[in-house]
Image (cartoon, rainbow, N blue to C red):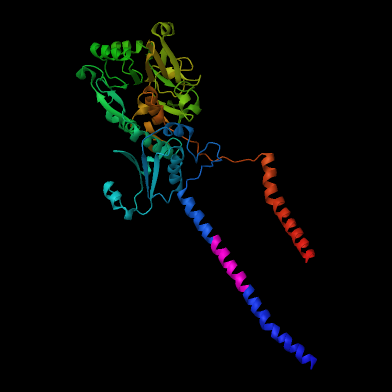
């Protein structure tokens, strides 16, 4: 009887215990679902927030190839105009989007509009004549705008066959272009020139891309150098300038005018008496003969008159963010009248020099690739230079002279069997553009290059200890700590 009553009491408790367990499970289950939902909601919220927020850049590469250079930051940070950068169909290339977002960090006047579905933006398709799959970057400031295509974000070094990423350079210069009210005026002197300006079309187009206006001028027909000329470009002459042209150019110099000369050796022996009078204002002379390199490492494909030289340290290159080497073709040697420089109030700087194994060849019928008895002695030759002439206190005239014009032209050549143009060799184009920027005191448009070469990363001993600790020691510590906590809780029970 007792046994039956005890079983009855126990049976009565079972439903209550079952109900309690159900309620406890229900409560804990509800809490778990709520907790999971909260975690998911927080995760989604953080992702949405991160999509809208541009995080500060963290670039651990030595050359900062994934972040903006200090040059770009300095150029853009103080611009007070509202700028819109429309990035169209670049989801396939996150690096482009990354670069555009970096500009927002340094200037709150810059806004980014990312368009991944161009078919929904018929306004853009109509305005810029785009197909739904086309890519483009549009930089706008008020009524001014500049468009960039894929081809504007990359260039090629045809002597090394490397593709060079110039995305940062293109975007930075586009921002400067649309926010610059007054553009520099560049004039190419067309009269008496050996080559028409169509041979310099690439470099002229590149100058225009960097907030310059480029025109040609016949000084004799115009009655002088235009008053709005910021830089006068003179290329190799086929005949001497007139006395009137000479006097007009000298007057331009004495008024603080800037000159870029790209004049090769006078291989035809033309009398250039009047033109030399212009050069005499800076105490400079372009010598007769062609410079040949004697060092095989400084020539292209074994051609000693295709010389590869590196820029020297001077007031121009100190403002650059790269080591620049260029390829000059049939260049001449430049000399200065050292005795007259002080009298002329001229300070000179070597821009490009050869190795000490170079020599000058005046007899161009000689076909030997190496130095002969009738060639000049081996010497370091200056082939490009900067001269600054003080006109009066606070007023100067600057000259940049290259004893070569072929390196800046669209002249077709074959390098190792591949066709290219001479202006595309090495950093030829970049150095010319930087020369113009320097003469116009427009360092804000200087070209930007970064070293994208792959570099093997070797950790230091201290870094190696930290990495090994994180990989091996930290997990063991966490496991041990977990076991200790579990044992403590178990004993308390």
In the rendered image, which quarter is residue 225 located in? top left
> What residue is rendered at 59% in x and 67% in y?
31
In the rendered image, which quarter is residue 421 located in? top left
> What residue is rendered at 53% in x and 57% in y?
43
Tell me if 29 is positioned left or right of 73 in this view: right
> Image height check: is 33 above or below 463?
below
Residue 461 point in image, percent of width and height: 69, 39
Tell me if 202 is positioned left or right of 298 in this view: left
Within the magenta stretch, is there residue 58?
no
The N terminus lies in quadrant: bottom right
**Frontmost residue, 377 versus 334:** 334
Most distant residue in the bottom direction: 1
> What residue is rendered at 26% in x and 19% in y?
227
Q: Is residue 81 visible?
A: yes
Q: Give the residues drawn in magenta, as a range.
A: 25-39
> Image height check: is 17 above or below 216?
below
The C terminus lies in quadrant: bottom right
**Frontmost residue, 251 versus 336:** 251
> Image height check: is 291 above or below 54?
above
Look at the magenta stretch and give its main secondary structure: helix
**Frontmost residue, 390 versus 14:** 14
In the rendered image, which quarter is residue 166 located in? top left
Tell me if 13 is positioned left or right of 431 in this view: right
């Amino acid at each position: 009887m007792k046994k039956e009553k005890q079983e009855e009491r126990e049976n009565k408790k079972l439903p209550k215990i079952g109900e309690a367990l159900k309620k406890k499970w229900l409560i804990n289950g509800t809490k778990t679902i709520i907790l999971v939902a909260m975690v998911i909601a927080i995760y989604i919220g953080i992702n949405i927030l991160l999509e809208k927020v541009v995080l500060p850049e963290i670039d651990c590469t030595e050359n900062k190839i994934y972040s903006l250079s200090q040059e770009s930051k300095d150029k853009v940070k103080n611009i007070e105009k509202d700028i819109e950068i429309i990035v169209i169909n670049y989801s396939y290339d996150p690096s482009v989007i990354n670069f555009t977002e970096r500009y927002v960090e340094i200037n709150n006047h810059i806004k980014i509009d990312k368009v991944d579905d161009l078919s929904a933006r018929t306004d853009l398709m109509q305005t810029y004549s785009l197909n739904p799959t086309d890519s483009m970057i549009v930089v706008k400031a008020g009524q001014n705008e500049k468009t960039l295509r894929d081809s504007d974000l990359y260039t090629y070094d045809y002597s090394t066959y490397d593709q060079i990423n110039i995305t940062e350079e293109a975007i930075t210069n586009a921002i400067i272009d649309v926010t610059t009210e007054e553009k520099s005026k560049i004039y190419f002197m067309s009269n008496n020139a050996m080559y028409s300006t169509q041979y310099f079309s690439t470099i002229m187009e590149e100058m225009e891309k960097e907030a310059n206006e480029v025109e040609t001028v016949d000084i004799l027909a115009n009655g002088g150098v235009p008053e709005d000329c910021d830089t006068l470009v003179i290329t190799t002459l086929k005949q001497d300038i007139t006395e009137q042209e000479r006097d007009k150019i000298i007057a331009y110099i004495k008024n603080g005018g800037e000159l870029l000369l790209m004049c090769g050796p006078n291989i035809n022996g033309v009398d250039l008496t009047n033109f030399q009078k212009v050069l005499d204002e800076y105490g400079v002379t372009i010598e007769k003969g062609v410079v040949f390199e004697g060092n095989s490492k400084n020539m292209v494909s074994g051609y000693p008159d295709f010389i590869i030289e590196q820029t020297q340290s001077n007031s121009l290159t100190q403002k650059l963010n790269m080591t620049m080497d260029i390829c000059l073709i049939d260049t001449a040697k430049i000399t200065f009248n050292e005795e007259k420089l002080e009298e002329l109030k001229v300070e000179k700087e070597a821009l490009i020099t050869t190795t000490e194994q170079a020599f000058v060849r005046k007899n161009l019928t000689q076909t030997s690739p190496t130095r002969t008895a009738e060639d000049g002695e081996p010497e370091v030759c200056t082939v490009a230079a900067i001269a600054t002439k003080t006109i009066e206190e606070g007023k100067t005239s600057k000259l940049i002279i290259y004893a070569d014009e072929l390196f800046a032209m669209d002249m077709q050549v074959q390098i190792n069997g591949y066709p290219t143009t001479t202006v595309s060799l090495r950093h030829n184009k970049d150095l010319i553009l930087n020369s113009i920027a320097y003469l116009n005191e427009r360092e804000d448009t200087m070209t930007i290059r970064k070293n994208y070469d792959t570099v093997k990363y070797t950790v230091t001993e201290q870094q190696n200890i930290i990495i090994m600790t994180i990989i091996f020691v930290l997990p063991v510590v966490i496991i041990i700590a977990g076991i200790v906590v579990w044992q403590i809780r178990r004993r308390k029970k």
